[in-house]
Image (cartoon, rainbow, N blue to C red):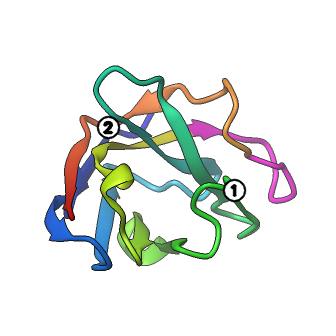
């Protein structure tokens, strides 16, 4: 199975933008890929996902319209573009994946995620 490494986190002021990257050690063509975050003392929150082969995306209501998931299949890299950041977006951000059987599978942000990166920290100041 692939291994995932996130990068791109950092500190930004409210209203700013960041782009996170998730580099996979191999092809993710037959995978669902997703982004999650966890702030101290809070439960892990699913942000969105994509069926890499089919391209179908899903976003949680909390980030819809502000965050965008994209992919570069040639580089086996997933991205999370985050705009209009708020202090409440401060958290450790994780990339995750699980193998899937077809391009039309809905990936969602449920309990199927079996492969996780180590995370990258995002801090948004007011």
Q: Tell which of 95 and 84 is nearer to you.
A: 84
Tell me which residue sits at (41%, 77%) in the image. Answer: 84
Residue 124 locus on image (x, y percent): 22, 60
Question: Which is more N-terminal, label 1 or label 2?
Answer: 1
Q: Residue 61 carries which label?
A: 1
Q: Is residue 37 left or right of residue 7?
A: right
Q: In this view, does 46 lie above or below 66?
A: above
Tell me which residue sits at (47%, 40%) in the image. Answer: 96
Crowd tier of the residue under label 1, counting other residues whose Cα lies within 10 Å: few below 14, some 14–19, many 20 or above:
few
Where, quadrant-wise, is the N terminus in this rendering?
top left
Magenta residue span: 98-107
Residue 23: quarter of image: bottom left
Q: Is residue 107 left or right of residue 41?
A: right
Residue projecting furthest to the left: 11
Residue 101 locus on image (x, y percent): 79, 42
Let me know if residue 105 is in the magenta part.
yes
> Gap between marks 2 and 1, in whole Å?
23 Å
Let me know if residue 31 is in the magenta part.
no
Residue tagged by mark 2? 117
């Amino acid at each position: 199975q692939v291994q995932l490494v996130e990068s791109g986190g950092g500190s930004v002021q409210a209203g700013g933008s960041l782009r996170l990257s998730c580099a996979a050690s191999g092809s993710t063509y037959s995978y669902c890929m997703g982004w999650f975050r966890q702030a101290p003392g809070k439960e892990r929150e699913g942000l969105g996902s994509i069926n890499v082969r089919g391209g179908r995306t899903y976003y949680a209501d909390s980030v819809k319209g502000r965050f965008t998931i994209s992919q570069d299949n040639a580089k086996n890299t997933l991205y999370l573009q985050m705009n209009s950041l708020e202090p409440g977006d401060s958290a450790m951000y994780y990339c995750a994946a699980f193998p899937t059987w077809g391009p039309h599978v809905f990936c969602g942000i449920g309990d199927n995620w079996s492969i996780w990166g180590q995370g990258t920290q995002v801090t948004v100041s007011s």
